[in-house]
Structure formats: C-alpha cells, structure tokens
Image (tube, helix red, strand yellow):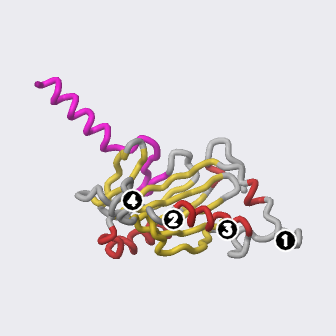
Amino acid sequence: FACALLLALLFSVKTAFAVNGEMSDGRYMDELGVCAFTPPVGWVLWDYYGLDVFSPAQNRDIRLSLIAEETTGNELLSEVSDTETATEPNDPASPFLKREAISFENTFSKPDFEILSLENRELSGHPGMEVCARATVENTLFPDTIIYIVRYYTPTHIVTMTLRCPPASLDEWRDTFNTAVDSITLDPSLGEGASSP
C-alpha cells in the first residue's frame, strides 16, 4: 500500500510541472526558446499529455498553451503577386495569408466545427491569423469546446497560442486570452540553430 501511495504521489508531482518550456520572472518561454508570454495571474502550469498548458487553479477544462514550431518560411519569404512583384506577407491580400485562411476554414469546417471569427493579425512585423471556432454537437473528439487560436509566422518559426474552453466560458475568459496574446514576444534568433529573420 505504501509503495502504491508513493508511486501515485510521484506521478501526481511529475504531471504537475511543465515538461518542455520554462518559467522565468513570471514569464513562460517555449521549449525552443523563440517566444514567451505572461500567463494569467493565478493560473497554474501543468503537463497535458506532454503539452505545457496553463489553467485556472481549480478548472482544468480551460487550457491555454503557447507552442513554437520550426519552419523554413519559404512560402512566407517568396511571396509574389499575380504581377510578379513581391507582396508584404502581412498584407491581408497576400497569397500566403489567403492560403492560411483557407487552411483554417478547412480545419474548422462543418459538420464538426463552426467558425465564429477569422481575421488577420500582425506582431512586430510578422503576419498572423486569428480563428475562433465552436465544436458542434456532431463533434465527438472535442465535445462542447471552443478553440481560440492566434498564430504568427516568422521566417524561422510558427508561433501558436491556443485557448480551449467550454462555450459558456468564452465571454468570461476572452479578455484574459487577449491579454495573454498581447504579452507574446517573438525572438526567433533565440532558438537553437535559428537565424534572424
């Protein structure tokens, strides 16, 4: 009984802490070291199946994550318009952002999801997209869920912040999510092996 209790205690301690990123001076930095943000006050960091997430201390149905993924950025850097002149990637009319919008529309399409909003964003000169979608009653994988994503594209990384919460909680946590998004800093040169954009 004592051994089983000790194992259960060790497992609960292991799952309570982050496994990828790190906290420093109240800010969370992703495991690649290319982006950071200030988590909501009172939210706790824990391991959700290998993903670092933040949740209100007593409500793990609400999850906030920040992830950076390496990318070649070739599509972003080689944008050309129909007239063969380079376009700004963060121009809403850029082919790159149009493709990203179509990708989000396809990902969050019916019958499983309903898109509530989809728009362009920008951070420190980097283009981005924001999508908010609600799972429909047909969705058996994420029942009764809102997925709110803000994604930024740099020449070296894709940075994604995601909020998952029950639909009834969206209005309550929308401002908290927006504050967390506003606190994101991007510095791809910090990532191991990354080059400056």
Q: Residue at x 61, y 68 (%)?
A: 123
Any mark on residue 82, and which?
Answer: 1
The kind of residue tagged 4 is Asn
Q: Are marks 3 and 1 in contact (CB under 8 Å)?
A: no
User: Left or right: where does residue 94 sit relative to residue 65?
Assistant: right
Give the numbered dot on residue 30.
none
Question: Residue 30, how many percent across, how many down?
Answer: 50, 50
Q: Earlier in the sequence, mark 4 or mark 2?
A: 2
Task: Give whichever of 98, 130 is nearer the camera.
Answer: 98
For discs 1 and 4, the disc positioned in front in the rendered view: 4
User: Magenta span has 14?
Assistant: yes
Q: Residues within 10 Å of mark 4 (few under 14, many from 20)?
A: some
Q: Quadrant of residue 59?
A: bottom left
**Disc 2 secondary structure class:** loop
Front residue of 146/46: it is: 146
The span picked out in magenta is 1-29
Q: What whole-number distance in Å separates the C-alpha atoms at marks 2 and 1?
A: 28 Å
The 10 Å Cα crowd at callout 2, few under 14, some 14 to 19, many 20 or more, is some
Local crowd at mark 3 within 10 Å, few (<14), some, or many (≥20)?
Answer: many
Q: Earlier in the sequence, mark 3 or mark 4?
A: 3
Q: How many labels sit on residues?
A: 4
| C-alpha span from label 3 to label 2 | 18 Å
Rendered position, 84 above or below 27: below
Q: Which mark is residue 139?
A: 4
Position of residue 187 measured from the top left corner of the image (x, y, whole percent): 62, 56
Identify the disc placed on residue 109. Answer: 2
**What amino acid does circle 1 point to?**
Asp
- How far separated are the C-alphas under marks 3 and 4? 27 Å
Residue, disc 3: 97
